[in-house]
């Protein structure tokens, strides 16, 4: 009986040891697979270069701002490339995106790469990078701010349509498409445009190491090719994504061969419907007419 008891005890010990080693082997296998996925498929625990695409009309986007906050805090995101192909957008949209990219640039190197078009608020966004490059044929610049309105009171009178507005003051809801712009309204609107224009020019002077006078001389609304932008010191060089990666590796001591991962924005079904609906409206109407408030946008056929 004593022999049988010892035998049972030994068997239990053996089973416990086998269970322990099997468990350790399974854990090691899971860790190894996860490490392999992270290395070869861009798993969040591997180092990478973030890639942000700024395309189309720029508006304030809370989800994009939050995504950039995640990139700023992510230690595995060693740098960021900002691709810009945009005619501009709202002043608030460009300003907000500029500040969020600067938060990333304060922690890791950021380079802006211009595509076919990076004008107005698109150029404002590029200013957030530690370096800006473009193609020779890129169109950029158009530094300025605009407020537009349409006045149709004459047409309405011809059609026999009268409009009335009861307002708390003469500057409420002005300018309005239903009444001519008065000198007082024009002065107030011009002061708003001038204030935001001053902010934009100050930003150019600060980020491009220019005097305010030199920045102002370049800010008459004209556009520049990439070649001219280098000459005017609005950008730093000519190139694309390959040159951007080379610069990051050489100037910022990044290890070669880091994978690029796009900054992903999660949107629900309703947001996608709104997005495609806005694209449909812009296919029929000018993008400029779908933007409210002060805008910084270049549109050659409506200048």
Image (spheres, grey):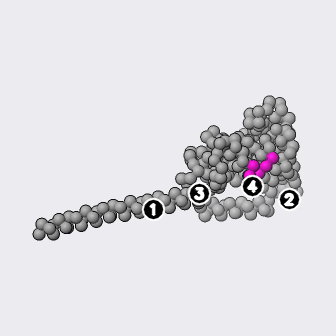
- The residue pinned by badge 4 equals 56
Nearer the camera: disc 4 or disc 3: 3
- The residue pinned by badge 3 equals 42
Q: Which residues are magenta?
A: 238-243
Q: Earlier in the sequence, mark 1 or mark 2?
A: 1
- The residue pinned by badge 1 equals 29
Distance from the alpha carbon under mark 4 to that under mark 3: 27 Å
Nearer the camera: disc 1 or disc 4: 1
Q: Position of residue 138 (x, y in %)?
A: 83, 50
Q: Quadrant of the N terminus?
A: bottom left
Are the residues tagged 2 and 3 within 8 Å (C-beta)? Answer: no
Assess whether residue 280 is covered by the magenta stretch. no
Helix, strand, or loop for circle 4?
loop
Are the residues tagged 1 and 4 within 8 Å (C-beta)? Answer: no
Distance from the alpha carbon under mark 1 to that under mark 4: 46 Å
Q: Earlier in the sequence, mark 2 or mark 4?
A: 4
């Amino acid at each position: 009986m004593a022999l049988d008891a010892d035998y049972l005890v030994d068997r239990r010990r053996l089973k416990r040891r086998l269970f322990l080693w099997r468990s350790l082997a399974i854990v090691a296998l899971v860790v190894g697979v996860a490490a392999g996925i992270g290395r070869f498929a861009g798993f969040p625990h591997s180092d990478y270069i973030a890639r942000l695409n700024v395309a189309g009309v720029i508006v304030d986007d809370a989800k994009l701002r939050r995504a950039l906050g995640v990139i700023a805090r992510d230690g595995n995101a060693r740098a960021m490339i900002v691709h810009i192909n945009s005619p501009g957008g709202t002043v608030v949209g460009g300003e907000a995106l500029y500040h969020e990219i600067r938060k990333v640039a304060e922690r890791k190197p950021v380079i802006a790469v211009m595509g076919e078009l990076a004008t107005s608020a698109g150029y404002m966004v590029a200013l957030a990078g530690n370096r800006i490059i473009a193609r020779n044929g890129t169109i950029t610049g158009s530094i300025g701010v605009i407020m537009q309105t349409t006045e149709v009171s004459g047409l309405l009178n011809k059609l026999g349509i009268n409009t009335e507005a009861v307002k708390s003051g003469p500057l409420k809801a002005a300018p309005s498409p239903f009444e001519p712009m008065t000198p007082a309204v024009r002065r107030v609107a011009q002061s708003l445009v001038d204030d935001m224009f001053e902010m934009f020019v100050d930003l150019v002077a600060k980020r491009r190491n220019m005097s305010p006078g030199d920045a102002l001389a370049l800010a008459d609304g004209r556009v520049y090719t990439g070649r001219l932008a280098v000459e005017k010191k609005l950008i730093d060089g000519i190139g694309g994504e390959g040159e951007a990666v080379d610069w990051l590796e050489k100037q910022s001591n990044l290890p070669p061969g880091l994978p690029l991962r796009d900054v992903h924005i999660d949107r629900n079904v309703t947001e996608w419907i709104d997005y495609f609906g806005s694209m449909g409206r812009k296919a029929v109407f000018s993008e400029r007419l779908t933007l409210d408030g002060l805008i910084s946008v270049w549109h050659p056929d409506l200048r």
